[in-house]
Image (tube, grey):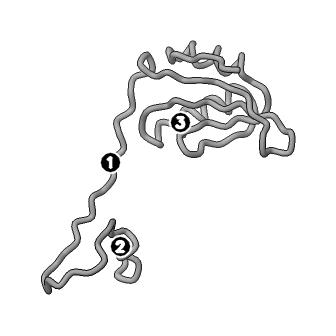
Amino acid sequence: MSKKNDWKNREGVVYSTNQNFQYDYSEAQEQGTLPPQQQNLKVSLDKSGRAGKQVTIVTGFAGKSEDLEILTKKLKTQCGVGGSCKDGEIILQGDLRDKVVQILTKENYKAKRVG
């Protein structure tokens, strides 16, 4: 971490009179990924804020971002569409709720169609 920007990561520490003060940066640890049988995924359709285009959103994934990216790539490949993963959500282009639920249940995830 550069000296120039390390002050931005100090949560609540503004100034210290101690000459030997060293701030202890606590790294946020990602939780381990739950097994597929314990995941409760919700598959929904959204088109708000997307110029009327429909997207399928998968929420409820609990785990590391690397595992979320792997699942996103698998869904994109099997559905043959584009998409991404942001903020713990998988976003796929188009209305693919039924197909996504089918793929996730085949992979032993607990998937539920919402909306």
Return the residue nearer the eye: 83 or 61: 61
Is 32 left, or right, of 69 in this rendering? left
Q: In the image, what residue occupies the spot 59% across and 45% down?
A: 86
Q: Amino acid at mark 2?
A: Met
Q: Where is residue 71 shown, x and y percent of the image? A: 55, 32
Element under label 1?
loop
Quarter of the picture holding the C terminus: top right
Q: What residue did someone put label 1 on?
A: 29
Q: What residue did someone put label 3 on?
A: 70
| Circles 2 and 3 in contact, beta carbons < 8 Å | no
Tell me how far mark 2 sits from mark 3, CA to CA: 29 Å
Q: In the image, what residue occupies the spot 33% across and 52% down?
A: 28
Label 3 environment density (alpha carbons within 10 Å; few <14, some 14–19, many ≥20): few
Q: Amino acid at mark 3?
A: Ile
Element under label 3?
helix
Q: What residue did someone put label 2 on?
A: 1
Above or below, 76 against 3 in this view is above
Above or below, 45 against 31 in this view is above
Q: Where is residue 79 shown, x and y percent of the image? A: 72, 26
| Circles 1 and 2 in contact, beta carbons < 8 Å | no
Label 2 environment density (alpha carbons within 10 Å; few <14, some 14–19, many ≥20): few
Q: Amino acid at mark 1?
A: Gln
> How many tags in the picture?
3
Which picture quadrant has residue 44? top right
Above or below, 45 against 51 in this view is above
| Circles 3 and 1 in contact, beta carbons < 8 Å | no
Q: Nearer the viewer, mark 3 or mark 1?
A: 1
Q: In the image, what residue occupies the spot 61% across and 30% down?
A: 58
